Image (cartoon, rainbow, N blue to C red):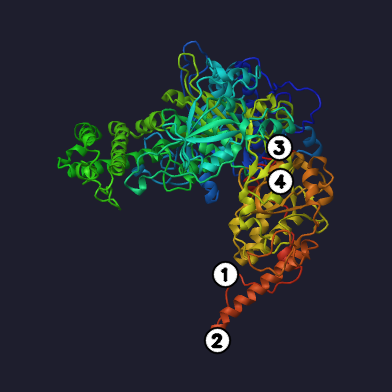
Amino acid sequence: MWDESLVPSINYSGEGCLALPKLNLQFLTLHDYLLRNFNLFRLESTYEIREDIQEAVPHLHAYINNEGDTSFRGWSRMAVPIKEFRITQVKQPNIGEVKPSAVTADVTFSISSYRSQIKSEWDALKEHDVLFLLSIRPSFEPLSPEEAAKSTVPERLGLQYVRGCEVIEIRDEEGGLMNDYTGRVKKDEWKPPKGEIRTVKITLDTAQYHIDATELAEKGAENVYGTFNILMRRKPKENNFKAILESIRDLMNETCVVPEWLHNIFLGYGNPSAAQWINMPDLLETIDFKDTFLDASHVVQSFPAFQVTFINTDGTENMHPSPPFRIKLSKKMREISHALPGNVNASDTASKNNMVDDEGSQKEKLRVETYIPADPVPYPQDKPNQNSVRFTPTQVGAIISGIQPGLTMVVGPPGTGKTDTAVQILNVLYHNCPSQRTLIITHSNQALNDLFEKIMQRDVPARYLLRLGQGEQELATDLDFSRQGRVNAMLVRRLELLGEVAKLAISLHLPEDVSYTCENAAYFWLLHVYARWEQFLAACVPNKENPSFVKDRFPFSEFFSDTQQPVFTGESFEKDMHAAKGCFKHLSTIFQELEECRAFELLKSTAERANYLMTKQAKIVAMTCTHAALKRRDFLQLGFKYDNLLMEESAQILEIETFIPTLLQRQEDGYARLKRCILIGDHHQLPPVVKNMAFQKYSHMDQSLFTRFVRLGVPYIELNAQGRARPSIAQLYNWRYRELGDLPYVHEEAIFHKANSGFSYEYQLVDVPDYRGRGESAPSPWFYQNEGEAEYIVSVYIYMRLIGYPANKISILTTYNGQKLLIRDVISRRCKPWNIEPPCKVTTVDKFQGQQNDFILLSLVRTRFVGHLRDVRRLIVAMSRARLGLYVFCRCSLFEQCYELQPTFQLLLQRPDKLALNLEECTPFTERPLGEAGNIHYITDVEDIGHLVNFRLEHLRQMQSMQYYAPHANADAAPPETGNGDIVLDNAKDGTEKENGEATDAVNNDKIEEDTVESKDDMV
């Protein structure tokens, strides 16, 4: 594990060669591709485990006691001393093998010394979690500095052995089963864990056990399994390496069939545009765009290279067109793609992409068919949701490409509507290909939830949506889209629909037993409902001249008697017939849903129902890339099938974690079922996280599949209009993209034309000098902090809150975890006594990728070296998180000299580097227009803003005291208490140590362990 030749340290400088595989542009075969990724992923996992051990063990303060045994003075959040370790079973080897078929053991430990939060983390251990058994035996006397410098890491830690294990089950002090998901413990029988002693049943690595047992028997080596004294866990999000490695191994042992149209491009050969939709067979000739276009002018604007002509379904010209629209793709539309080759200049692509002829006569005609939408439904709740986004021509091009077979790549700069485009692709794809199933993959749970919440706002029935994984609890919706939630919803819906069937039977004067089961309801539909409808249609043919015929003879009038408005008027046969078809559509939908519920009536167990839902019922299944890799074997066993793959945040996903979701299904007769692959991402923002610098820089492990395809020259569509930020803020990062403009929305909305109250500028670079004679500091290696910037930012935050800015509209970002913890500490110290709510988020730039807020306060921390902000991709993420206000706190003289950051910092430095405030504005809204600075008050340093904030806080306290004493002026009133209970605020003093005192650099063990310490040049 500590062999530098296998797992190089983080100090890799980039010089020389390493015995490591590389991930570049091309691969020999799929097996070669998988083997390289397997080796690199295994080594990266080893490195991360090694770092976690080095982080946890020193906090234990191991020593040799008087009895000669190892004891521990300290404690660690992630490691606990073992009370008892006992091997319980060693099974006989399988035929043809020498290693045991299984080795199980029991590990007992106590969580009594931990606080409740850490106890709950240990109690959350569940089946298949990976733990580590450590044998620690420190030297009797501490190592001298000279000896420590020469010794290896295991020698310094006293670490003798490390063995991995996998949890089978965990029990409490009374033997009660905890966290069981196998069904052995029913929900109504669940009880909270008893006592503070926990026993974990684990399975050990049989191959390693055989090696250890052989050395013990043949060489008389030490019994490794009698020396374990520490049980270590890892963060669940970082501890899924075993299942992913197993998935890669399974792929290597199978005959992988990548879709034929994707195979050569995937390996890096052939024509890069071969998989583009214009070169694919079996295209959709006519596309029903449903609610994509808001009106006829929207269609015309979306196809500037064509002369748009609107026609009716019978081919006649429509002079007053209205949505929805169907479009038949012309030959020229296939030739003029919105996609841009990834390896040509912007000027060339601009000329190619804007091929619009000046003379309208030379434009090819594009026939757009308008049609009458589905028959109107009698109840308002049945009306489908409609899209309200006015898509740009480039977004429409992305939607067309995504609907067609083949590979679609969409580059989405910040705020350009990647999610809206993806959702509309799914919506149109569902309606044009209703029998096909789509798999959605994202990098983070938050992105998946954002995507899912927007899908629910489209005309896609909720019964066809399924969300897998642990993030469905975070969905901001009343509906539960997990497997269990969808099963329960289907059962509830079944009862509701059967109630409607009973109501229909009563209205037809038939027995109610037809609503007993879904099967009975199906017979009722055929024998009574559909038969009556056919008789009614036959009777309508000779009576079309009778305007009241439909009203008088419609067989289900009594059932629809509870509508808000009368269904039929009796004045027009055509209108009444249209309404009758809408009513019949409502009835047919009821029985169609009942037919889909029938399986849940026959399947009795929850597991069977959930598996049926996933493999048969759901049309859109969503999960994270990690969940897909973890559960691949389960998906294959269940026979999971899908036709389309849409991947969001694909530029943030490791290459192998992008590849695995394409193979979550078994091949059919040697052919791949996958028809469409839609990759959406932004390779100009942060890449996948790889902690080891050698694997990142030398092996290119941080290169995503999306980025590799762009480098190969695969055509992509780059969205070119942002609607997130003020145009002036967007200039800080739009230089990195090809012709990134603004949506009309950001020029029309009043909020983008008003200045930020209390600030002279909407964005500003604030120079922060040394605070108390010090700039950056590092309490531990690569754990960078800057106390001056932390105090400055928190003071500005308090200033904004006193003006009236909502806390949920402000986020504080920084580039290092150490600074993040320091800022949280300062906020707690300075805001809690005044009952000031903390900001929406205090986090790192890397963690905030994909999110946004109105106002961003950004700390760049470093004062000696630029650090990892030199990576322009991190700068782009940092600059693009704000909508209305961005304030950057840094050492100006350092960052202005960095060549890579020049385009952004040249704009920032056009304004003063002292914070410019407008102290006359004391409300969160101002009528001052953007660009007008007002009466500027410059803040000179950290103490200056601290004095200002303290003065305003004291003024606020005095005002509150006056309001309290006013009704009791003539009474003996007790001194008022502050909102914080026992704390009574003293008079604020300018520059007091109490408010702006030095924040401690020492961070408690539990705080450091909340976040992994960054590597030298990379962010965790």
Q: Earlier in the sequence, mark 2 or mark 1?
A: 2
According to the image, label 1 marks what residue?
979
Viewer can see residue 648: yes
Q: Earlier in the sequence, mark 2 or mark 3?
A: 3
Q: Residues within 10 Å of mark 1 (few under 14, many from 20)?
A: few
According to the image, label 2 marks what residue?
972
413 or 694, nearer to the observer: 413
Q: Nearer the viewer, mark 2 or mark 4?
A: 4
Tell me how far mark 2 sits from mark 3, CA to CA: 72 Å
Q: Amino acid at mark 4?
A: Thr
Q: Is residue 896 left or right of residue 761?
A: right
| Whether residue 938 is situated above or below residue 695 in the rendered picture | below
Q: Residues within 10 Å of mark 3 (few under 14, many from 20)?
A: some
Quarter of the view holding residue 660 = top right
Q: Quadrant of the C terminus?
A: top right
Q: Amino acid at mark 3?
A: Arg
Q: Amino acid at mark 1?
A: Gly
Q: Secondary structure at mark 4?
A: loop
